[in-house]
Amino acid sequence: MAATFELFVDSADQWRWRLVHTNGNIIADSGEGYASRQKCKQGIESVKQNAPEAELVDAE
């Protein structure tokens, strides 16, 4: 089974997403809240489209 995106509402009543590995560990999160579920889902689609082959850059 692959990792899954979870949508949820935070304590500030903002929509957020997190990418969860099959073992339950959070791999990534939205880093910001969205005003609507629709905008949150658009954020997920943006990650899927823009990062499938993202390069690894060491920040030094």
Image (cartoon, rainbow, N blue to C red):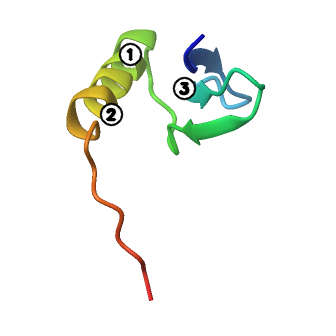
| Separation (CA) of disc 2 from disc 1 | 10 Å
The C terminus lies in quadrant: bottom left
The disc, 2 or 1, on the residue closer to the chain's N-terminal end is 1
| Separation (CA) of disc 2 from disc 3 | 11 Å
Task: Name the amino acid, label 1.
Answer: Lys
Viewer-side label of 2, 1 = 2
- Circle 1 residue: 41
Q: Is residue 60 above or below residue 2?
A: below
- Circle 2 residue: 47
The N terminus lies in quadrant: top right
- The reply, left or right, for residue 48 in relation to residue 50 is right
The disc, 2 or 3, on the residue closer to the chain's N-terminal end is 3
- Residue at point 28%, 50% (across, down): 54
- Residue at point 45%, 28% (across, down): 34
Residue 33 in the image: x percent, y percent? 51, 34
- Say whether marks 3 and 1 touch (CB < 8 Å): yes
Task: Name the amino acid, label 2.
Answer: Val
Residue 57 in the image: x percent, y percent? 35, 71
Number of on-image labels: 3
**Secondary element at tag 1:** helix
- Say whether marks 2 and 1 touch (CB < 8 Å): no
- Residue at point 57%, 28% (across, down): 19
- The reply, left or right, for residue 32 in relation to residue 9 is left
Residue 58 in the image: x percent, y percent? 41, 77
